[in-house]
Amino acid sequence: MVGLSHSLIGLGLPAAVSTHFFNGWTSAAAAGPPLVESEWDIHVDWRPDRDRLQGLWFRVQYGRCTIWQGGTVTNGEELRVVLNYKLSHY
């Protein structure tokens, strides 16, 4: 697994971008025929710096994978939009 991230605060944006690459394999009996998987993930995080939006955090994630197993190739894609908010209990 290899990853890279960069803060965009220097550009005046309260955001960060990161990407990860994963390549792995297994021949474990529980997995069936031997398999190899490659995956790319990209994340964009944005935390607004306005008072009314304090504690809010948006994340957009995109992932793409390719799996080789038993002579078959399967491709997958996933897009997620996540909204987090920090709550104070006291």
Image (cartoon, helix red, strand yellow):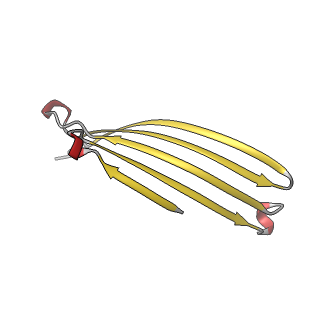
Query: Which residue is at the far front?
Result: 11
The picture quadrant where one finds residue 11 is top left
1 to the left or right of 31: left
Q: Residue furthest bottom?
A: 28
83 over 27 or under it: above or below: above
**Is residue 67 rendered to the left or right of residue 59?**
right
Q: Nearer the viewer, residue 75 or 12?
A: 12
Name the one closer to the observer, 28 or 8: 8
**Which residue is drawn at the image coordinates 55% and 44% (left, top)?**
63
Total numbered badges shown on the rendered structure: 0
Location of residue 80 in the rendering, given as x and y in whole percent from the top left corner: 49, 37
Residue shown at the point (39%, 42%) measured from the top left: 44
Q: Quadrant of the N terminus?
A: bottom right
- Comparing 44 with 29, the one in front is 44
Which residue is rendered at x = 77% and y = 64% of the image? 30
**Residue found farthest to the right:** 71
Percent of width and height locating residue 5: 38, 54
- The x, y position of residue 21, in whole percent, is 55, 56
x, y percent for residue 38: 65, 54
Direction left: furthest residue: 51
12 or 33, which lies in front?
12
Q: Locate residue 62 relative to residue 26 in the image: left or right.
A: left
